[in-house]
Amino acid sequence: MKFSENWLRSHVPTSANRDGLAATLTAIGLEVEEVTALGDGLAGVVVARIVAAEKHPEADRLQVCQVDIGDGQPLQIVCGAPNARAGLVAPLAMVGSSVGGIAIKAAKLRGVESNGMLCSAKELGLDADASGLLELPADAPAGASLADYLGLPDASIEIKLTPNRADCFSIRGIAYDVAAALASEVVPLDIAPVPAQDASAMEVLLEAGERVPRFAGRVVREVDATVPTPAWMAERLRRSGVRPISFLVDVTQYVMLELGQPMHAFDRDSLEGPVVVRPARAGERVKLLDGREAELDAEFLVVADSRGGHAERAVALGGIMGGEDTKVTDATRNVFLEAAHWIPSAIIGRSRRLGLHTDAGHRFERGVDPELPRVAVEYATRLILDIAGGTPGPLTEATLADHLPRTGTIGLRRARVARVLGIGIADAEIERILRALGMQVATAGDGWQVTPPSRRFDIAIEEDLIEELARIHGYDRIPTTVPGGPARIAAPSETRLAETDIRRQLVARDYLEAVSFAFVEADLLEAWHSAAATVPLANPLSAELAVMRPRLLPGLVDALARNVSRQAGRVRLFELGRTFAEADPALRVPGVPAAAPVETRRIAAVACGDAGAEQWGHAARPVDFHDMKGDLESLAAASGATLQFRPSSEAFGHPGRSADVYRTDGDASEVRLGWIGQLHPRLQKALDLGVDVVAFELDLAPLERRALPRAEALSRFPPVRRDLAFVVGVDVPWAALAASAREAAGPVLRDLVLFDRYQGAGVESGCKSLAMGLILQDNARTLTDQDADALVERVVARLGRDHAARIRG
């Protein structure tokens, strides 16, 4: 929000200087981002009228101007501005003054005397426009001080507003906060109702229900739309970041900045009543003021008239922008002013869908006082009548009272204020602050009954009022208190692996940690076959961030894709984060609000490119499933977990190169952790990856679990190794063979390794050869050959019985 300092001071008198005012605004939560001084050092600059302009005899781009400064003695000024012409009123820096650090002196330019300098807005430090002389209104008094005429010096102040302070998108809203902070009072705004002078009116029909509960309008006839915008109004707009366009447009902008209520002015003669406020129809189009044509759907609201019969032509995009067909021009004679209350949910996100950003939409998205439409129309009517004349009709207001926001009374307890803030604030000061903020305050038993103004949507409970007291009283006046009591140091549990250790392990395996958005695009989840039971956002920032992520991999793979598109050949990323799923609808109780989304802590990793960093000792090869499996097993080893891998049916996984991951620690319990593998080729093509990607995603909680460390004696006896080669069906997984072998061998089996896999000549079709090494060791004695042979026989028999495995001959 940008505004003129002098404009604000006209609403709240204060002796605070500019720096003090800026510091106060920041201290009360209206953070000042920039203060631009305007019009300092303009002594000696006056209003001047060019009475004659002739071409310089020695220069094509210069003119010799005769300038009237009101004393009857024209001054001769040599000027190079392209807009210098007879009749123009512009600023003149007199001889002896200083502009922009340049001392103005009498001089000769190409042999012609010049006694001063006609100035542009940039030279005066008033604007960035240096294209020509600053053109002043034709009725500006020649010889008057420019600073007095334009209300200078002044400053343009820009503040940064938090989303809850929509009321401060207006001069009046800011004024209430300043008045409370500086012990002042806001000057009452006299907006007496304008009596109707004829019966001209337009019927208004509300057909959008609760989305537009109030719409006010008035017809003003015989307006002179060609009158220039008064200098005081144009300057206030310009210093607030709004460039003046024409009087009727400027009036609506002026009212919006001063009161906070967006408005629109229609050319009455281009409308055919009644005016209808309704949802847009699918495929309906409207040409906007900026020249673009917008295609709408039922989520948009429009203002329509009856021109064209039952089609009800859309003439404005509700709460965002007016239409080209009904805009006011210099030829406009009759005006229809409108001001409506559009609820935030009806406007949020609509501008972004069309690639628009308007001041009106920005305000309605955050909330506008529902009591303002009538006030704004009355105020705009008075300004138009005073400056451009006209005949006002009656004010027409359509209201759906049941849908208007209602302001309730909030109890504020004296003891609660002291408890929350830790300090006592005098009763008189509490009442002064609340009343200065525009609230109604009534004394009650142990405190007060407070009714906030209708513009303050952010005040609903007692703590909101206490926050207002702290903000205005001053956070710097609340003492810092160190918490008392004994400190308790929470020792980390030895039964869980810390997230820090998990991060370190993956970093040691050459992965980089990534942090991706918790929101994703719904269409992206469709590509991942993960759109079921997702949690959509009620008010997403954009379509790309409309759904809470049910998995980490879509966002992590997207980060990998962006790196690959920037020619990063080898990418290895991991992320620890939360995923979100809809609560089980079967558990929902009728009449009770839906449960919060189910959050799950997960860990995911992705990799592409070469398996190892570039080096000369080994040939490069692409990373594959087994590399990722090794990284995962090293991570599991940190928690002492034993993992099993079984073929996966996940739709986004490669059908032959992906597996479901289970944790089995030797007991009867078993838990599925997640998925590991290569992405499906169709998914990689849909995501336009161009490289094979391997990944895993696991639930973090069961992976973190670890048994308490136990010291065990190392065997003093040598191990014995027996190697066996079995022929089994190609569909028999190694994990199943290993599980049977471990059960058959018992505790003497210390390790089991697969060291060869073969298919080809010598092995019949449909079978494979797996060679395994059994490492046997006892803590009590040295195993004999008879012991080892007996154990091997048990393993061979068990594998033959469970998996039809036979010793390869």
Image (spheres, rainbow, N blue to C red):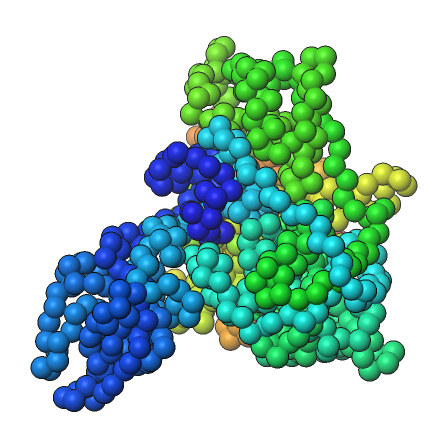
> Residue at left 58%, top 77%?
330
Q: Which quadrant: the C terminus?
A: bottom right
Q: Quadrant of residue 532?
A: bottom right
Residue 605, percent across and down? 52, 55
Seen in the picture, residue 182 relative to 43 is either above or below; the reply is above
> Residue at left 68%, top 54%?
378
> Residue at left 34%, top 50%?
153
Seen in the picture, residue 214 relative to 355 is either above or below; the reply is above
Q: How many marks?
A: 0
> Residue at left 35%, top 37%?
17
Q: Nearer the viewer, residue 578 or 424?
A: 424
Task: Name the side, left or right, on which 295 lies relative to 724.
Answer: right
Seen in the picture, residue 422 relative to 558 is either above or below; the reply is above
Task: Name the side, left or right, on which 613 lies relative to 386.
Answer: left
Q: Nearer the viewer, residue 614 or 787?
A: 614
Task: Name the side, left or right, on which 407 lies relative to 701.
Answer: right
Q: Nearer the viewer, residue 594 or 140?
A: 140
Residue 557, percent across and down? 54, 62
Seen in the picture, residue 383 relative to 172 is either above or below; the reply is below
Q: Quadrant of residue 189?
A: top right
Q: Residue furthest front?
A: 72
Residue 343, percent across and down? 72, 53
Task: Name the side, left or right, on which 626 lies relative to 79.
Answer: right
Q: Nearer the viewer, residue 771 or 291?
A: 291
Residue 325, percent across and down? 68, 79
Is residue 365 at all visible to an observer of this figure? no
Q: Residue furthest right?
A: 590
Is residue 141 at all visible to an observer of this figure? yes
